[in-house]
Image (cartoon, rainbow, N blue to C red):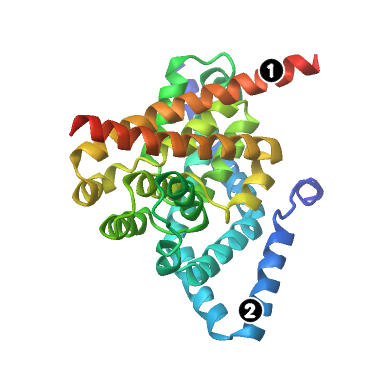
Amino acid sequence: MKEKAKTFAFRGKYLLLGVIIFYGVLSLVNSGIPLLALRKSILILIKVVPIFIAVILFTAILNYFIKPKQIASHLGRESGVKAWLWALAAGVISHGPMYAWYPLLEDLRGHGMRDGLIVVFFFSRALKIPLLPMMVDYFGWAFTVVLSLYILIGALIQGWILERIEHTNRESKC
Amino acid sequence: MENNTKQKKQMKEPSQKSSFWKILYKSSLSFWAMAPLLFGVIGLVGIFQVLVTPKMLSSLFRGNFMVDTLIGTLTGAAASGNPVISYMLGGELLAQSVSFYAVSAFILSWVTLSFVHLPAEVAVFGGRFTLYRNILAVVFTIMIAVLTTLTIQVLS
């Protein structure tokens, strides 16, 4: 119990406090705005809860079946092309807002996941397969195909650039 | 001999099960530790959705494709919500003769960039990573928007 009390600590307390104060100040100016915003926030939370549950389950399953050493070898510095493709595919498949995936990525990063792969994951999320028909409807086939292709290529290049930057930073420190 | 292995299996199964629950409990606990951070971000998203209206966003575009691409990137990052809304808004912007450059940048930055998520991203991944990632995302959003529009023009 003592160990749990030592390791467990809420994060983002000040952010939440700041947001609450912001809502409070806004209510002094116009009480309608914070009420409407609160309603919207509750609706967002209801939509996001299933994703949160899925992320918790996925993190647990991952930690149960794959050892930290294996994660490091698949997604760490020594990982190869496969890791980049996995990050790309995971970003495309992932649903919900970006922040819902922070806990899982933090966990994987703690086990040795490369930062470049996180960058690839975040940028490739711009490509949403279920929404492609809608994109085609609004902007046409050519636009959708070209943009999707550039998103995937751009995500990989960004990951590679970040790795280069981090490599240079490490070398300059040595 | 067979009984022995059965006994061993039985001994093993409950311990594996309990260890999974333990891991699940740990994952839930680390997620719960992040709850104030996530609630704070959701609260910010709610207030941004009320304060930053689509009308306000579309009124910012000026008609200059270079400036509009930058405005598209920044407004997409300032707005938040389902990507479907960005497509609908993008369609509206195109109907209002806003350039493809700006609309591409807008729908791209809607998903990849977010001012509202920044405090949480810094808290989870650190300031340096967040800075690099966001600078790269801004640069690539603009580049991809320009390249996409140019490619479409060449193709058509």
Looking at the rendered structure, the kind of residue marked 2 is Leu
Between residue B152 and residue A80, name the one nearer to us. Answer: B152
The residue at the point 29 percent across, 60 percent down is B96
Between residue B92 and residue A170, name the one nearer to us. Answer: B92
Q: Residues within 10 Å of mark 2 (few under 14, many from 20)?
A: some
Q: Which mark is residue B11?
A: none
Q: Quadrant of the C terminus of chain B?
A: top left
Q: In this view, which residue lies farthest toward the front?
A: B64
For the residues beneath circles 1 and 2, the answer to whether they share a chain is yes
Q: In this orientation, does residue A38 appear?
A: yes
The residue at the point 26 percent across, 40 percent down is A144
- Give how far apart the Cα atoms at labels 1 and 2 are: 46 Å
Residue ID for mark 2: A26
Secondary structure, mark 2, is helix
Q: Is residue B150 above or below residue A99?
A: above
Looking at the rendered structure, the kind of residue marked 1 is Thr
Residue ID for mark 1: A168
Q: Is residue A33 above or below residue B70?
A: below
Q: In this orientation, does residue A54 appear?
A: no
